[in-house]
Amino acid sequence: MPQKIRVGVIFGGRSAEHEVSLVSAASVIKALDKEKYEVLPIGITPEGRWLSTHEALKLLKEKSAVDDIPEHILVPDPRKRGLVLLHKASATDDARQVDVFFPVLHGTYGEDGTIQGLFELANVPYVGAGVLGSAVGMDKVIQKHLLQQAKIPVAPAVWFLFPEFETHRKKIIGQIEKKLRYPCFVKPANMGSSVGISKAHTRTELIDAIFLAGEFDRKILVEKGIEQAREIECSVLGNDDPVASVPGEIIPSNEFYDYDAKYVDGKSAAVIPAKLLKLVTKKIQEYAVSAFKALSCEGMARVDFLVTKKTNTIFLNEINTIPGFTPISMYPKLWQASGLSYPALLDKLIELAIDRHEAKKKLKTSYTPKKDWYKG
Ligand SMILES: Nc1ncnc2c1ncn2[C@@H]1O[C@H](COP(=O)(O)OP(=O)(O)O)[C@@H](O)[C@H]1O
Ligand SMILES: [Mg+2]
């Protein structure tokens, strides 16, 4: 029997979306085919402490011919803040190296490129976008710039740093009211699950909303409210040649798709596939794939749109590089509706992670100049 692939499923994390990640990870672990995979659950506490750290640390260990040289590593545990001596791992730990990481982490320190940087340094395959795609996918302001560059329609917006607002409040409010009017949406640039997001209908609400968003990020994005819009989501899968799923529609239980509507009240509904004109479906799939490429995504992403009810005007709202993975989450459900079961989707994601790693391994990381270039 071929050796099972050891998958390190990482969950929790230093994020406002910690709890959501636990639900997603439980469902990923359940659905991974145990005939093919050995699952190693790795937890990260809200403070950033790694549980089952030994296995992760083992991965980072650089093999050396000389066994007794004390090895130091930078541990991803913020309490250490530096290099620590890696004690000789026990015999049982040796058997627990990870073949591929599956970060089922949402939001900060999981979906934003930071942990992906750690995987890169450790030279181990991992599911999903790399450092750049993750960072760009997380920052709603940078993301918007790149989408505009790729000629993908987005809601008009104003952005600023929170300290700027404290000193130039009048000017910034003036810009927002002139360019966007009310209602507008105020968002921390780097967040997810609607945490810190408000819909502002008046100047007073706008100011409160900015202060709330400022609790989560220094960078604030204010967008024109797209009124009478449907929430359409589309899943994308692939590395160099990504493909789009059928789109689905979310019918939020609240005025907008806030945290409660997403996870708490259980009243939001999903319509899969979304009832859209063929032409609109096609356009959404095209934009989803173009955005995936323009934002340097890899593996997977869920691309969310706002589509106006009357005129079918499409706005790309945001991209999620580690979308929800609960059994009722849109990302796997849209693939299911497109003919790919949840376990088959996980197989594909792991295959894509390994493919990317193999392709990257072939690239040179050193260079020897042909001529003596140093004339000093
Ligand atoms: N410009 C907008 N116009 C109308 N609704 C919006 C707009 N921006 C966000 N929303 C609503 O707020 C929700 C959360 O915003 P989003 O940008 O997707 O943040 P998150 O990353 O937290 O999911 C959206 O699903 C939508 O319901
Ligand atoms: Mg969203």
Image (cartoon, grey):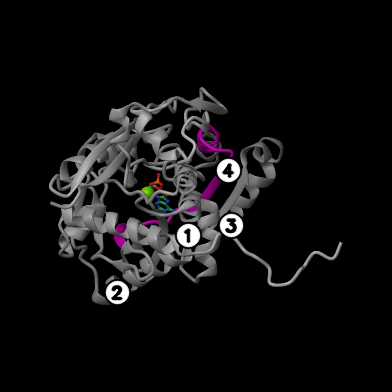
Residue that mark 3 sits on: 179
Judge left or right: residue 253 versus residue 15: left
> For the point 53% across and 48% down, which residue is it?
222
For the question of whether residue 301 can be seen, the reply is: no
Distance from disc 2 to disc 3, alpha carbons, whole Å, reads 31 Å
**Which label lies toward us, 4 or 3?**
4
Residue 32 percent coordinates (x, y): 18, 46
**Disc with the residue nearer the chain's start (3 vs 1):** 1
Distance from disc 3 to disc 1, alpha carbons, whole Å, reads 11 Å
Residue that mark 4 sits on: 219
Distance from disc 2 to disc 1, alpha carbons, whole Å, reads 20 Å
Q: Quadrant of the C terminus?
A: bottom right
**Which label lies toward us, 3 or 1?**
1
Q: Disc number at residue 282? A: 2
Looking at the image, residue 283 lies above or below residue 47: below
Residue 54, located in which quarter of the rendered image?
top left
Residue that mark 1 sits on: 155
